[in-house]
Amino acid sequence: MPLMPKRVKFRKSQRGKMKGNATRGNTVAFGEYGLQTTTASWITARQIEAGRVAASHFLRREGRLFIRIFPHKPVSGKPLETRMGKGKGEPEYWVAIVKPGTVMFEVTGVDESTAKKCLARIAHKMPVPCRFVHRRHAVA
Amino acid sequence: MAQTAQITAKARPELGSRANKRLRDSGMLPGVIYGHKEAVVPITLPKKEVVNHLSHGAHLFELALDAKRETVLVKEVQYDHLGLEVMHVDFARVSLDEEVEITVPLELKGEPKGEKDGGVLQQIINELELKCKVTDIPDVIRHDVSEMALDDVLHINQLKLPSGVTCLQDGDLIVATVKEIQEEVAAAAPAEEGAAEPEVIGRKPEDEAAEGAAPEAEKK
């Protein structure tokens, strides 16, 4: 079952803009390695689920996967062969908004080469170009 | 123990984002020195050298600024949105006999015994907040986890810290665990998209049913 919110304040949302870069969620916080997007996009709940399935098949019971994004935004659409007008369409699917720098998935409990292979499999399921990132230790 | 990195800095008369962009384009790095109730001094640093020292975990710098030498501690490092480029560095003035609060990486070494029994080592705390003298700042805290069995938990108070170094975090906090990861139960057949809808806050179920029926009628 793809991800979606349990409760929402409004059933439908406007499309919005994806301006700027990620200022939050742009560092590896839970795992040791991460998958970071370099462009802004909508990631659908199905794509997130496909990434999770690909990773869990690859990792089996070895490491642990963290999903850092959640599809909060409903996307509505009109049915086929419908004339324009008559109001906004019904919600069809849910998306997560990602901006350049957002860390989408994280892995821990595996070595670097396994983490790279695992995150590359997830990257194939994503609609955005991604890069592999390490945890950065604070010096301050 | 931390080595003091020697860097030559220059005062930065031009302030603002545009001036700083020009600086970065020319291979320099903007920074600032403050602390000890003295003046705040914006400075320019050689980027390559500073990044090299920072990547090796340097905390303490000795800055040569206009025939004056200042011992400073890295207080904050700003990175760009992808975490690739260092954008700005904050330095705080310190004296060598001063006690400071600092964040130091925590490394777990060794393969836990519990991994052979199907467990996975999960490190929950990756950085420790420590208090120590400036000259005693450790580069990294290493802890051997090879004796950890399945379902063992490592707490902060079990870590061995160098003498003169105290941890500011609660001793009962969990640093790492060795646990078996439960295999996920295969999800039920995915429902058709749009079939299930979340509950709308502040709306009665009858209203939603009425609204759902109206568009159906319009489609026909």
Image (cartoon, helix red, strand yellow):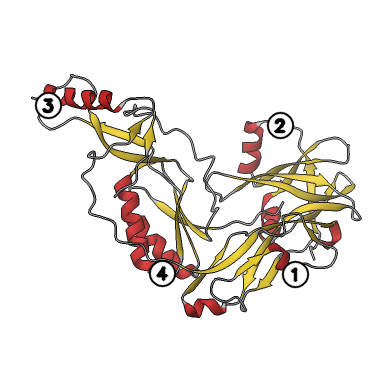
Residue placed under numbered mark 1 in the picture: B160
Name the mark nearer the viewer: 4 or 3: 4
Amino acid type at mark 4: Arg
The lab-note entry on whether marks 4 and 3 share a chain reads yes
Mark 4 or mark 3: whose residue is earlier in sequence: 4
Residue under the point 12% across and 26% down: A82
Residue placed under numbered mark 4 in the picture: A61
* A20 or B121: nearer the viewer: B121
Residue placed under numbered mark 2 in the picture: B15
Q: Up-down: is A16 above or below B45?
A: above
* B52 or B77: nearer the viewer: B77
Residue under the point 29% across and 61% down: B186
* A30 or A112: nearer the viewer: A30
What numbered label is drawn on residue A133? none
Q: Is residue B104 visible?
A: yes
* Disc 2: CA contacts within 10 A as few (<14), some (14-19) or many (>=20): few
Marks 3,1: beta carbons within 8 A: no
What numbered label is drawn on residue A82? 3
Quadrant for the C terminus of chain B, please: top left
Element on which disc 2 rests: loop
Report, in whole angstroms, how far the alpha carbon at label 4 lies from the one at label 1.
Answer: 31 Å
Residue under the point 57% across and 67% down: B177
Report, in whole angstroms, how far the alpha carbon at label 4 lies from the one at label 3.
Answer: 48 Å
